[in-house]
């Protein structure tokens, strides 16, 4: 168990990669990341994002933006505001799912945008959470957002569990990794806490940080509140060497770490 904290997402992610690289097993349980400002990026932060994105794509993995968009569709928000997120994106994803064998593609965003209640009526969990934030900003801890299976039955209570037993119980791998999102209000700022059941730190985590930061930006911007910190609990964290078709070696990770460290050293010198 380790707590890693810092100002920006790329900085904290890089420190987490170093920590896991230093562990003999390259893994740990309950690795907690606390990012004070998950949205703003310095020039060095952007350079680290660009280097990491090039590394992943160069080794057969998806881009950071692809990972981030599965959590929150920023491009649809920038183009269509609330309606882009609440209506246009789900409609587009519905057409994509209709022609894909993998119906779970992009499911994180869809899990927070489309559910069915006990009466079979489709509702939008993110929309209702946002409306609750706007209606009751004086409450600090009343805004939970689980990620149950899209358009399936909602369990009792306000929480929607991401783990769907009927679908996920026999999967040793490949099930949803993001388990729960908890939104808090503190002194006029929106805070976000995310729990992951399993986390691949090279192939997924920086993209996840970006996507969660976009979700936090959306909630803060739409409510007129400030942007608070992002906290991530990786209940199992692993420094991975890619999974098919992606692949890299620990020596490649070491080269990336050194190059990213150089970006922050240059920024410090310039300051």
Image (cartoon, rainbow, N blue to C red):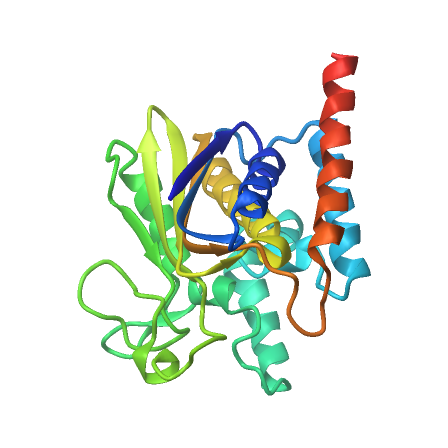
Q: Position of residue 138 (x, y in %)?
A: 25, 31
The structure residue drawn at horizontal position 26% and vertical position 35%, both measured from the top left corner, is 140
Q: Position of residue 246 (x, y in %)?
A: 71, 68
| Picture quarter with the C terminus | top right
In front here: 78 or 173? Answer: 173
Find residue 236 and report its image quarter.
Answer: bottom left
The structure residue drawn at horizontal position 40% and vertical position 55%, both measured from the top left corner, is 126
Q: Is residue 223 above or below residue 210?
A: above
In front here: 74 or 124? Answer: 74
43 displayed left or right of 77: right
156 displayed left or right of 175: left
In front here: 75 or 214? Answer: 214
Q: Is residue 269 above or below residue 31?
A: above
The residue at the far top in this view is 271
Q: Position of residue 167 (x, y in %)?
A: 38, 83
Q: Position of residue 72 (x, y in %)?
A: 54, 55
146 displayed left or right of 212: left
The structure residue drawn at horizontal position 48% and vertical position 42%, both measured from the top left corner, is 216
The structure residue drawn at horizontal position 47% and vertical position 75%, both measured from the top left corner, is 173
The residue at the far front in this view is 24
Q: Is residue 256 above or below residue 89?
A: above
224 displayed left or right of 209: left
């Amino acid at each position: 168990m380790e707590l890693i904290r810092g100002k920006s997402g790329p900085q904290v992610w890089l420190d987490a990669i170093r920590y896991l690289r230093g562990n003999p097993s390259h893994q740990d349980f309950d690795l907690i990341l606390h990012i004070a400002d998950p949205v703003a990026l310095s020039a060095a932060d952007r350079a680290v994002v660009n280097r990491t994105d090039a590394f992943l794509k160069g080794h057969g993995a998806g881009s950071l933006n692809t990972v981030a968009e599965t959590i929150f569709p920023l491009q649809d928000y920038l183009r269509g505001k609330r309606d882009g997120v609440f209506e246009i994106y789900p409609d587009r994803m519905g057409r994509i799912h209709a022609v894909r064998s993998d119906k779970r593609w992009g499911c994180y965003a869809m899990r927070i945008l489309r559910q069915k209640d006990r009466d079979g009526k489709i509702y939008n969990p993110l929309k209702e959470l946002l409306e609750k934030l706007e209606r009751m900003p004086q409450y600090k801890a009343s805004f939970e957002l689980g990620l149950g299976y899209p358009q399936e039955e909602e369990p009792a209570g306000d929480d929607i569990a991401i783990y769907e037993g009927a679908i996920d119980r026999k999967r040793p791998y490949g099930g949803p990794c993001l388990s729960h999102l908890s939104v808090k209000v503190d002194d006029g700022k929106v805070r976000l806490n995310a729990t992951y059941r399993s986390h691949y730190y090279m192939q997924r985590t920086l993209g996840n940080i970006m996507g969660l930061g976009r979700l936090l930006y959306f909630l803060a911007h739409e409510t007129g509140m400030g942007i608070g910190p992002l906290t991530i609990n990786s209940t199992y964290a692993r420094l991975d060497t890619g999974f098919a078709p992606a692949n890299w070696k620990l020596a490649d990770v070491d080269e990336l770490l050194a190059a990213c460290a150089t970006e922050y050293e240059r920024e410090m010198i310039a300051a």
